[in-house]
Amino acid sequence: MKKQLFFFSLLWVLLLALPFALRPKEEKNEYAQDVDVLVVLTAHNKATCDEYERGFRAYYRKLRHRDVRIDFRSVGGTSDAVRYVADRYEMEFRKYVEADPSRGVWSATAARGFSDPKATGEAAKYRELFLHSDVGIGIDVFAGGGIFDQEKQSRRGFAVPGGVEVRHPEYFEHIPREFGGSRVYDEKGRYYSVVLSSFGIVVNSDRIREMHVPMPQTWRDLGQGCYFGTLAVGNPTKSGSVAKCYEVMIQQCMAEAPDLDAGWADGLNLVKRIFANSRLVSDSASTIVRDVGVGNSVCGIAIDTYGISEREYQKSLSGGEAHLVYITPRGGTAVSGDPVQILRGAPHRQVAEDFLDYLLSEEGQKIHCYRTGTPGGPVVYPINRPPVRRDLYDENYQKFAFDGSYNPYVSGEDFVYRPERTGRYYALIRQTVKVLMIDCHAELTSAWRAILEAGGPEKVPQAFAAFNALPYTYAEAPQMAAAITLSPDHDAADVARTLRRWSDFARAQYRLAEKLAKEGK
C-alpha cells in the first residue's frame, strides 16, 4: 500500500513539473538588468506594434548598446486618443498651476487659454506659462491618426519639435515637404509622416458578379441606386482617416463644379447618397474591409493599407487568388501622411528621438513595405504600408515590397488637395456627416428607397430636391463651424442646440422626400 502511495505521489509531482520542463527557453537578454522604456499612444494594430518593437529594439541595441521596451497604449480610435491627450494635459497643467501660487489661480479662463494658440488677455498668460513648461502626461510619442489631428495638437502646444531634420538632414533628401497639396511634415518638426495613406474602394468581386452591377471606378459610382443596401462606410467622428476620405470626396466635387457653393452641396449630397446605400456604418475603419472581405457588404470605403493587407491575406490563404479588390478612384485619390510626434514633457525624451530617427531611416522604412522574410523586412507580420521616403520606390527596393506596382506618389498625382477650401471645415464635415447621415440614417435610407422605387431621381425631381436640401450653404460654413466650436460665445448647450436643429431639419426633409416620392413627384 505504501509503495502504491509513493508511486502515485511521484507520478503526481512529475505531472506538475512537466509543463515547466517542456517550456521553451526564453531568449537570452543580456540587457535584462538595464532596459530603457518608450511609451507610445497609438491606434495601430498589434501586428504593427509588434514589428515596431522588434525592429526598434535591434536598431537601439546597435545605437545605444542597451535594450529597450515599448509600452504601447491604446484608448480606442484616433478621436478617442486626441480627446484623451487634451483631457490629460488640462488635468496635469492644472496640477502644475495649483502647485505654486505665483503661477496664478486655476479658472475657466486658464482651462480655455492654456492650449489656445489665439488666446488673449488673461488667458494668454496661461498659454505662455504652458508653452514654457515641461508639463507631461506620461506619454512620449503619439503615433498615427493623420496630419489634421497631429497638426492640431502641435498648435495647441501638446507636441514639441522632434529634431529629426537636424540630426539627419539626409533623410529629407527623399521626403518632400508637401505632396498633392498636403503637408508631409511640420516645418518646426512637431510631426513627421512615416508612411503615406490614400483612400479607395474595396470590392468583393464574387458578390458584385452575383449582383450583375458594374465594378465602381469613382466615388460618384458608389452613390448610384444599384448599390442600395450593399455598402460599408465609416463614422468620421470615430476615425480621422474616414473623415479625411469624405473631405476628399467633397473636394473632388468642388473641383469639378462651376462654383464652390455648388461643389460643396454636390459633395455633401454624394456622401449622403453613399450613406443611404450603406448596410453598415462602422466606428472602425478596419472593420469595413473585413465586412467586405467576408461578403457581408459588396463594397466599402477603405484606407489603402487595410484594403491591400486584406487582399494579400486572402492570397496567402488561397495560394494566390483573392476575391477582394482594391480600387483607386479616378481623379479622387488624395495622398496624406500618417505621422508621429513627440509629446510635451515626454518622460523618455532621448529614446523618443531615437524612435523617430528609426522610423524615418531606411531600416525603419523597410519594415513598413517589405514582405516578411525579405532582407530587412518584418519578421512575423507584414505591415503593408507605403513608405514616405521616395527612394524606397526604386526598383532595387520594390522587388521586396508587398506590392511592387503600388506607388502613392504616382496614384495621387491627378488630385491636388486645396486646404483653403475645406481644411478649416474638417471638424464641421465630421459633425455634418454624423448629424445628417448617421443620426438620421433610418429616415435617410427610407427616403432614398422611396426615390429609387419611384424610378430614381429623374422621375421624382421634387422628392430628390427635398432629399438634397442642406441646413446651411458653403457661404455659411464659417459661421456654422464657429457655432459648433466651444468658445466664450458658444458653450456645450449652444453647440448641442445647433446640432439638434440640423438633425430636426434633416429628418423633416427626408420624410418630405419620402412622401413626395410615393406621390410620384
Image: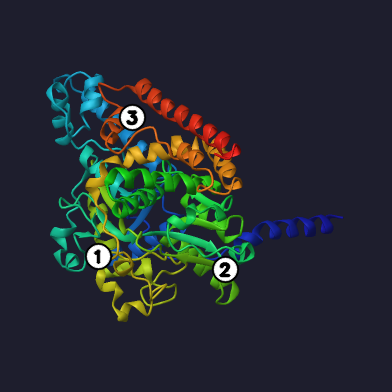
Q: Residues within 10 Å of mark 3 (few under 14, many from 20)?
A: many
Where does residue 313 sit, x and y in percent of width and height?
A: 53, 67
Residue drawn at x 25%, y 21% is: 488
Q: Taking 137 as reference, is 293 left or right?
A: right
Tell me how far mark 3 sits from mark 1, CA to CA: 48 Å
Sequence-earlier tag: 3 or 1: 1
Q: Taking 242 as reference, is 323 left or right?
A: right
Up the image or down, 439 lies above or below 283; here it is above
User: Visible in this render: residue 411?
Assistant: yes
Do the numbered discs 3 and 1 sit on residues whose CB atoms are within 8 Å?
no
Residue at which label 1 appears: 63
Residue type beneath disc 1: Leu
Q: Residues within 10 Å of mark 1 (few under 14, many from 20)?
A: few
Residue type beneath disc 3: Ile
The disc label shown at residue 158, or none: none
Residue at which label 3 appears: 484
For the residues carrying marks 3 and 1, which lies nearer the camera in this image?
3
Q: Quadrant of the N terminus?
A: bottom right
For the residues carrying marks 2 and 1, which lies nearer the camera in this image?
2
Where does residue 7 sit, x and y in percent of width and height?
A: 79, 60
Q: Quadrant of the C terminus?
A: top right
Tell me how far mark 3 sits from mark 2, CA to CA: 43 Å
Where does residue 340 sit, x and y in percent of width and height?
A: 29, 53
Residue at which label 2 appears: 323
Where does residue 312 sit, x and y in percent of width and height?
A: 50, 69
